[in-house]
Amino acid sequence: MTDMAEPVSTLALAGGALRGLLRRGGAFPDATLEAGGVWLRGEAIAAYAELCGFNPRAGVPPTFPHILAFPLQMRLMLAADFPYPVMGLVHLSNRIRQHAPLKAGDRLAISVRTGRLLAHDKGQAFSLETTARRDGQVVWEGSSVYLRLGAPGQGDPAPVVDGGPADTRVGTWSLPADLGRAYARVSGDANPIHTSALGARLFGFKRAIAHGMWVKARAVAALTAGRTVEAGEVEVAFRAPVLLPGQVQLLAGPEGPERFFEIKDAQGARTHLRGRLSLKTQDLSC
C-alpha cells in the first residue's frame, strides 16, 4: 500500500509524466487524497529552514506544510482521470493561511482536493486546495493555482496580487546553480526544470529555474526577521522564472497589518514574484 505522504519517486514521476503527455483533456475531476499521521519532524524542519533562510529557533516555517502536502498534489495530478499532463504546468500563484502555531512533533492529517477551474488568457488554470488538521482542528490551509498553457480557459478569473507599494530594498541574494537540486532534497519536488539544465531546456528555459516556493519561502523568512509565526496569511503570484545561477533582490512596503513585497532581478527591471502578507509573529525574546 502506498504511503500518500511519501515523496513520489523519480521513476513514478517520469512514468506518470509520460502517460500524461498522451492525455487529450477531459472533465476536471472532483477528487480528494488524504494522509493521516503526517509528523512535523524536527530534522526535516531544520534542513528546510536552513535552506530557505528561516531562523532555526523560530519553529516551523509557515511555508513548510506545503512540502508535506506536495506528494498528495503530485499523486492527484498523476492520476489516470486528471485531464492535464503534469509536466509543463505553470505554477501561477500560492496562498497559505496559518490558523495556529505549529511545532515539531505535531501530528497532522493532510488532505488535498481539486478546487475549481479558473480563466486565464494563456490557457486553462485550476486550483488545488490543501487542509492540515491537528486533533481534528484546521491549523493550516493552502491554495495553489496552476496553468495548462493553451487556448484561453473558462471559470472565474485567476487570482492576482496587486495594490500597495513595495519599493524599499530589504535584501539581495546570489542564488547558486545547484539551488534547485538542494531544494528538491528537502521538498521532494524534483521537477527537472529545477534540477537539470537539459530538463529546463526541454521546456524552453535557458537554464534551470528556482522553485517558486523556495523564492516565496526566502522572502517570508526575510520579512519575518527571525520571529516565530503564530498565524496569518501569505499570498504570492509568480510572475517570471528565476534562472540559476542568478541574483535577485527583495523589495517591500512599510510594515503594517498588510505588507506588499516583490522579488525582482538585480537591476530591478523584471518582477519575478509579487506578494502580500499579514502575519501574527512573536519575537523570540518574549
Image: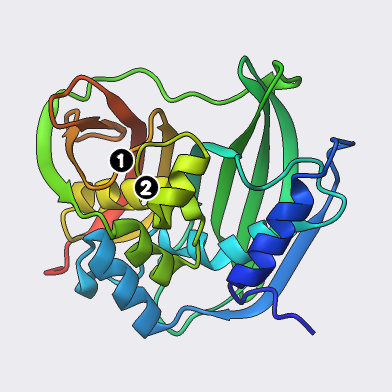
Tell me where residue 256 appears, x and y as whole percent.
Answer: 23, 34
**Callout 1 secondary element:** loop
Q: Which residue is mark 1?
A: 243
The residue under the point 68% across, 77% down is 36
Taking depth in this image into account, of 51 and 267 the one nearest to the observer is 267
State whether residue 91 is above or below residue 228.
above
Tell me where residue 96 appears, x and y as whole percent.
Answer: 48, 48
The crowd level at tag 2 (other Cα within 10 Å; few <14, some 14-19, many 20+) is: many
State whether residue 263 is above or below residue 217.
above
- Residue 146 appears in which quarter of the rendering? top right
Q: Is residue 77 visible?
A: no
Q: Is residue 97 left or right of residue 207?
A: right
Taking depth in this image into account, of 180 and 253 the one nearest to the observer is 180
- Residue 162 appears in which quarter of the rendering? top left
- Residue 44 appears in which quarter of the rendering? bottom left
Q: Is residue 267 visible?
A: yes
The residue under the point 29% across, 25% down is 271
Q: Which residue is mark 2?
A: 208
The crowd level at tag 1 (other Cα within 10 Å; few <14, some 14-19, many 20+) is: many
Q: Is residue 60 left or right of residue 113?
A: left
**What distance separates the C-alpha of mark 1 from that of mark 2?**
6 Å
Quadrant for the C terminus in the image: bottom left
State whether residue 94 is above or below residue 252.
below
The residue under the point 37% across, 47% down is 208
The residue under the point 80% across, 85% down is 1
**Mark 1 and 2 residues: CB-CB less than 8 Å, in contact?**
yes
